[in-house]
Amino acid sequence: MTDGGIQTSRNAPATLHDVAREAGVSLATASRSLNGSTRKVNEEYRQRVLEAAARLDYSPNLSAQAVARGTTTTVALLVADIADPYFSSIAAGVVAEADTERLIVTMAATERDPDRELELVRTLRGQRPRVMILAGSRPTTDPTDGALGEELAAYERAGGRVVLISRNEYDFRTVLLDNRVGAAALARELVGLGYRRFAVVTAREGLRTAADRLAGFRDGLAEAGIDLADDDVIRADFTRDGGYDGTTTLIERGLHGVEAIFAANDVMAVGALSAVRDAGLTPGVDLAVAGFDDVPTVRDVTPPLTTVRVPLEEIGRRALRLALGDEDLAAEGAVATEVVLRESTPRRA
Amino acid sequence: MTDGGIQTSRNAPATLHDVAREAGVSLATASRSLNGSTRKVNEEYRQRVLEAAARLDYSPNLSAQAVARGTTTTVALLVADIADPYFSSIAAGVVAEADTERLIVTMAATERDPDRELELVRTLRGQRPRVMILAGSRPTTDPTDGALGEELAAYERAGGRVVLISRNEYDFRTVLLDNRVGAAALARELVGLGYRRFAVVTAREGLRTAADRLAGFRDGLAEAGIDLADDDVIRADFTRDGGYDGTTTLIERGLHGVEAIFAANDVMAVGALSAVRDAGLTPGVDLAVAGFDDVPTVRDVTPPLTTVRVPLEEIGRRALRLALGDEDLAAEGAVATEVVLRESTPRRA
DNA sequence: ATGAGCTGGGAAAGCGCTATCTCGAATTGC
DNA sequence: GCAATTCGAGATAGCGCTTTCCCAGCTCAT
């Protein structure tokens, strides 16, 4: 063999069978000793097995266990984009909670493509995960024509548990964030600070989360008798660059008295901040900016960003607990959000 | 049964056996039709099987396949903290590359705890992943006393592939970033901009990556005949808050002429920026700040951060390709880094 | 003593697949 | 026209486990 190493013989990993032989007990006893089944096993035997396992560096084959038991210890998590702090925070929560339940998380990225998402669900279903968590909003109109819903339903029929994060489109358990209420509260606060003329930079038509936030913001303004002209709603990608571009567009076409920008999520808001600055204006002074989510970085941008706090990691944890059948949670309703005022929206003189 | 739903009978998922029966062919033929084995199967039969599979909403049980084939399609990825942009960027790269290879990624977080890391490796080994990627630096002194190395070696002996990212402690394939060279280049550039007195905010003793970056920075300064006093090296957590705290400490104890701070990674640098500001100074004007990594957010902080770009996502992709046996990569050596000068380190008058 | 009732180890039947092997039928060569 | 091949479907032996099921050896009440 061309394997250059010394003693690098390719040993197949030890099987339970090997352990049993090494310990001089039956396969059944070895199995029982190593995973605490309902049945007791003589302490002396147990020790022998444990030692043999350690000696052989045994590691149980999870696939085989899954096949034999008919159930896995896997959680599947789908997000739009792993590098986006919104999703990575949620993912961190899911992973943390999974860890306490000794579950393993498999992750995939949909890249905001419904077809991809559907395909990923199909593949991941093959893993027979105990739970499947889908984060990230879907288009309000579904180009795959309900195929995703059917796929998920089939998965649940087979004993799986689906949890949706912030998308109440189908009839599955859902962790809802109060996008609408949060955005309304933000609008109210901004009005309270003296702002009267607003523009909104949001996602292109058809993204549920973005739509709700816009609607909520309108609600809040309406309470104060302020109307948001359609012209003052700019559509762009739901990303940092989208925020930048949308804001640039807004500024170039002329602000016409707009005093504050509401960006439908924080990464857009951060882009907006940079766009404002690049246009030669001072964010917070010439033009206020507010976002939504309170992702970790927004307290470190300048000026620190006013936003609506969403407990992202908690949402991840909650999604998993919900899937695992914590019914208290199911009753609790939407996750509360909280307006966080920072210097990007100073009180208006 | 207490199942409240209409027609929500809990159907076990269809098995290949069911598909074969439905299609009126043997198990073997069904298997061959659904995954294109080496053997041909009559087109008419194939169609029948495919249709039956669709009708029954069949999804192959990956665990069973893994057991039967003796090999999985899984990649295990260990990172310190999923919500940290450094790791989430790398993870995004791994996931993207895995996707093109039709591999599934399972992710876990070590939370920078070597014991946890070891335990996670043990658990994940049970999955028999094809590849195991460990990102994130380890202490230079290993509290688990080489146990991790042994565990990984055992895993490789059993046919797995280990890839380390930015940690060349063991004898496994590694994606090395040129921390030392990058930091030296940064130092050189800063000197070129007119800076002469530096402080470094870095991780506590014993973190490889941080140590290399410090050493490199010293190298670069040394070329210009500048010495970095030990007093001017502040140790703190390798996180945003660590950067903040370390910088605060530095400022409180008196700057004694320090003109620029080098933070050993970007999240620390971002914390440093905030600390400078909170101390009543203007970052970039009163005190320059530079970081390392070029995580996405640093172009949006104010002033935009000078840093050393590390192609994080590319590193993730590369790690996986390397594991999969792309030997060209193995020969390529460390990943190149590049100094990116931004406004947090303006030319000194 | 005796038989009913526990204990707890071992044999073996799966779990849902893949891959080898078998073997009849169709194809080919001379 | 008949043996020698080739082809491809089906039976079956695993893969590494778990979990019945069986049964020997006990204890204990009668």
Image: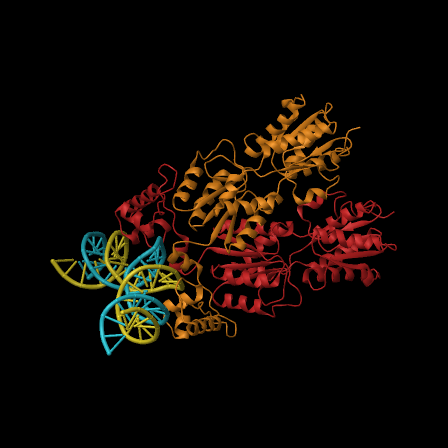
Chain colours: A red, B orange, C yellow, D cyan
D10 or A111, nearer to the observer: D10
Please tell me which residue is depicted at 81% across the width and 59% down the height of the picture. A232
Kindly indicate the quadrant of the structure image that contains residue A233: bottom right
Q: How many marks?
A: 0
In the rendered image, is residue A228 in sight?
A: no
Q: Is residue A111 left or right of residue A41?
A: right
In the rendered image, is residue A309 in sight?
A: yes
On the rendered image, what quadrant is the N terminus of chain A found in? top left
| Above or below for B135 versus B96 | above
Q: Is residue C1 left or right of residue B293?
A: left
Residue B327, percent from left and from top:
49, 43
Residue A110, percent from left and from top:
59, 58
B91 or D6, nearer to the observer: D6
Kindly indicate the quadrant of the structure image that contains residue B258: top right
Residue B198, percent from left and from top:
69, 26
| Above or below for B180 versus B325 | above
Q: Is residue A249 left or right of residue D12?
A: right
Residue A46, percent from left and from top:
31, 46
| Above or below for B119 versus B36 | above
